[in-house]
Image (cartoon, rainbow, N blue to C red):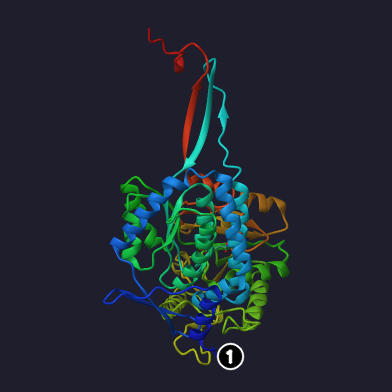
Amino acid sequence: MTATTDVRTAAAEALASLGVELPAVPDGGASFEVRSPLSGDVIATLPQAGAAEVDAVVARAKAAFTTWRTVPAPARGAVVKAWGDLLREHKEDLASFVTLEAGKITAEALGEIQEMIDVCDFAVGLSRQLYGQTMPSERPGHRLMETWHPLGVVGVISAFNFPAAVWAWNTAIALVCGDTVVWKPSEMAPLTALASAALLDRALAEAGAPEGVSAVVLGAREAGEALVANRDVALLSATGSERMGAEVGPVVAARFGRSLLELGGNNAAIVAPSADLDLAVRGIVFSAVGTAGQRCTSLRRLIVHSSIVDDVVARLSRAYAKLPIGDPREEGTLVGPLINQTSRERMLASLEQARAEGGEIVVGGEAVDVDGAAGAAYVSPALVRMPAQSDVVHRETFAPILYVMSYDDLDEAIAMHNAVPQGLSSSIFTLDQREAERFMAADGSDCGIVNVNIGTSGAEIGGAFGGEKTTGGGRESGSDAWRAYMRRATNTINYSTELPLAQGVDFG
Ligand code: UN1
């Protein structure tokens, strides 16, 4: 294992290269510390917003909305294009924040920034395609159509594991839709947020956009709660735990706001007898151990046909035994740290429970020491064989644990697959078209993302992203997810000289 070089210096250098100055903590003001998961060291101390500050920021965003919504959508798209160009220019710098704060290996951190660039490109095109439909009217001389209008202030609450991209999916789309955005990033990744938002601010300022189109509020629970409760937040898009979603959803609903929730995943892949196993093993390992198992889309359950399960487990354990674990900035590292010690404790506790429920840890599942990183939480990804019925498997543990179970027929595999509360992502490895189609059919996978011959993670931005059941039902990013960020008006236009009533009503 390699030594972790000074993360404080790295953070300072990355901030300087983007020209970002950190806000100072006012005298006697509330503050919070930011620790890098690479070493556990404190890399910044930042002011923490309370409810009053959040409300003031939302009020500014509401005022900015009255101007921004009148800017033509393609002109709003041009601002997003300029933002995307800045992201391209500063891709490496931004990625270094993602590594420092979320612990991602460089390739995955760069991938996260690429995802932001991709969604900007998508949103630029979308800015000329916010189509409404026209329908035939039942009345002569009438026309029926839909118009999509900007919605208002969009509140974004994001998690540590995608500290920039999830905000960007929301923001790029919200901006072309004519909304303004207030972002409460994870308190574990505020530097990534400040750096990312600084680039958007630059693009907005150069375009002469009103102040307050985009804003960041730093803080923890209190700031998040204020954003959720604020009646001027028309759409609240929140990514995080199911517990958080269960608190946020009812509060937003009670004030008749809209929410878009991206909560837990307990994603599974089925490996059928016909699968191309070389390809399957590569897809499984990336999805299970990428981002150290801390993506919402991480693969957590593997349901393998009994005729090949021993072979699959043997191949996976060979791959797991060779995984380079350590400082995510080092070339060759594939597994960086968990976000913090609590996360590691939860992982070890889940493995303990798995053992108690009849599981066998085939490989991994141990704390790993990395030189110079005593305060960090590195682990070896765990591969665990489980009996089919087990409680721990039905719970999401946000760590690299892959539970392997076996099945005999596909109906049984699909039933096992769907027998968890969450419904985000899923996949099947098979070369049998009937099986693939069955998995994608109405009585197949019950998830929002259903893949064939690729893993559960790493979705492209072009599709709608989100899931069912306790995952929360929201859809972000591509396809027609933009509709959640706008309000629909139905227009009926009478261009005749008569006044026929709908449903044939005769009113004298
Ligand atoms: C998340 O983990 O919150 O599909 C988002 C993926 C990424 C996004 C994950 N494109 O893995």
Q: Residue at x 61, y 43 (%)?
A: 128
The one nearer the camera, 167 or 448, is 167
Q: Dot 1 corresponds to which residue?
A: 2
Q: Quick check: 311 left or right of 400?
A: right
List x then y, in percent, for residue 118. 62, 59
List x then y, in percent, for residue 222. 31, 65
List x then y, in percent, for residue 95. 57, 72
List x then y, in percent, for residue 29. 28, 74
- For the image, the number of numbered tags is 1
Q: Secondary structure at mark 1?
A: loop
Q: Quick check: 14 left or right of 24?
A: right
Instruction: Assess disc 1: are there few (<14), some (14-19) or many (≥20) residues with their C-alpha within 10 Å of its C-alpha.
Output: some
The residue at label 1 has a CB less than 8 Å from ligand 1: no
- Residue farthest along the left direction in this orientation: 28
Locate ligand 1 by image quadrant.
Answer: bottom right
The one nearer the camera, 388 or 38, is 38
Q: Quadrant of residue 385?
A: bottom right
Residue 463 visible (yes or no): no
Q: Is residue 49 above or below residue 424?
A: below
The one nearer the camera, 229 or 358, is 229
Quadrant housing the N terminus: bottom right
Quadrant housing the C terminus: top left
Residue 279 visible (yes or no): yes
Q: Residue at x 59, y 77 (%)?
A: 105
| Residue type, mark 1 in image | Thr
